[in-house]
Image: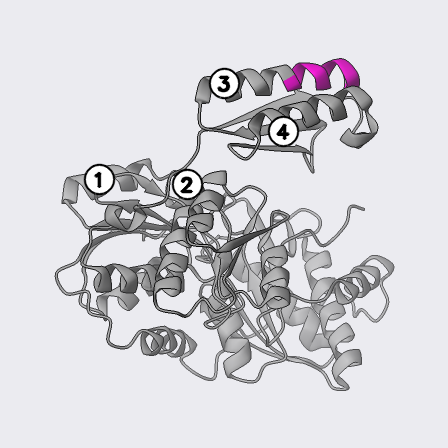
Amino acid sequence: MSKLFGTDGIRGRAGEYPLDDATVFKIGCAVAAVLTGKLGHPPRFVSGRDTRESGEHIERLFHSGAVSIGSAGESAGVITTPGVAYLAREFGFDVGVVVSASHNPYVDNGVKLFLTSGQKLPQADEEEIEKIVKEGQKIANLGSISANLRAKRDYLSSYLDHLADNFAGLDLAGRRIVIDCANGAASDLAPKLFGRFGANLTVINASPDGRNINKDCGSLHLEHLQARVVQEKADLGVAFDGDADRALFVNEKGEIVDGDATLWILANDLKRAGKLRSNKVVATVMSNIGLEHAMKSLDIELIRTPVGDKFVLEELLKSGAEIGGEQSGHIIIPKNSLVGDGMITVLSVLRVLANSGKTFSGLLEGFETFPQILVNVKVNEKKPFDEVPEIAAAAKALEKKLSGEGRLLLRYSGTENLARVMIEGKDQGQIEQYANELASVIKSALS
């Protein structure tokens, strides 16, 4: 059997391991067993799901497993991932459970687990859950999966009230905004939320049918949003992914504004207001060097982490930085939430825009994205690059050529036998030449 937990919870094709009926039931049992051991009592949990056709069935299986060994659970129904994390904290649950595969197609699904702090379960807990699932310890037999997915409160309204209260005073009257809900968890919530602030909304891809989540829409497919923003003469467009923990933007010109640009907008505003007390921003190794240069112009230190919101959050907590995120639009503002929340990101940007007197494109003054090239090289083995003399020498020579005016990122794919050569610099033709030269060295050495 393959490893159960990945970098973002448990994920796979619905109906197949680890999301077959028996395994999901076991996961519910194992989560309850591990947390009972830690807490000294069976955990109370709240769950929610995105709009995939497999979501409710998987949620019922998890509930059935957890309840079979003494836990008590409630369901908030269709809700965003950060919404579940908020409910777990606000209403005293021991754990939040999200059934979602984020930006993946509808055939996939997953299970994410959040502590009341908003952080994901520690690795030690994940390993213990995995051991129980694989060895069958403390697990009841798969029985009825007719768990009652009930909720004692109107959790959706509570979450919307929470978001609205945090941005009280924001006036979006007269603002034309196009929202792409990806036919996902934000489909009902986002229009209601932004409508509270008086915005003139055009809502697209907000009719989920169980199979159209993320299909040619949302944060991975921005071309339709770009066209609609221009057509509507809107001030901006917003696109969520399936579980709405991330958001990407389109400015009034129809140009894409990614997570790097969003970090610039928000960090610049915090710095101007004297609220960036750490003078640090956290991003990942994939963030464009243009962000680094822009931050340097404000004397802000950019700290880079491995790819993944888990690593961004770890560094935010360690460094005390006020904001961090990924190029994909996953932004974390610890003051608001330890979970990336696409709707908080949007409201934060809209507040900056409302107070600036500028157009959305005007907020990007001072930020320039450098050209980037990515070349994949098939390899027979994934030997550490610094242990291959010719690769190490070529990489060192290239970094010297770039000398602060560009950046080299050399890494292996996590799932394929590929070496990835990513170079950023001021001249597209030059970095393409550099990338192909280094790729040839890697191919000769490792293929």
The residue segment tinted magenta is 438-446
Contact, mark 1 vs mark 2 (Cβ under 8 Å): no
- Which label sits in the foreground, 1 or 2? 1
Inspect the magenta stretch and tell me whether residue 310 lies in it: no
Q: Is residue 221 above or below residue 177?
A: above
Q: Amino acid at mark 2?
A: Lys
Q: Could you say which disc has been placed on residue 253 in the image?
A: 1
Horizontal and vertical percent position of residue 59: 58, 64
- Asked if residue 439 lies left or right of residue 279, the reply is right
Which circle marks residue 215 in the picture? 2
Which circle's residue, 3 or 1, is located before the other in the chain?
1
Q: Is residue 432 above or below residue 198?
A: above
Disc 2 or disc 3, which is closer to the eye? 3
Alpha carbons under labels 4 and 3: distance apart: 13 Å
Residue to which mark 4 is pinned: 399
Residue where numbered disc 3 is placed: 430
Please state which of residues 231 and 105 is positioned toward the viewer in this rendering.
231
Category of crowding for the residue at label 4, using alpha-carbon neighbours closer than 10 angstroms: few (below 14), some (14–19), many (at least 20): some
Residue 84's disc is: none
Q: Nearer the viewer, mark 3 or mark 1?
A: 3
Q: Amino acid at mark 3?
A: Gln
- Residue at horizontal 45%, vertical 50%? 295
Q: Secondary structure at mark 3?
A: helix
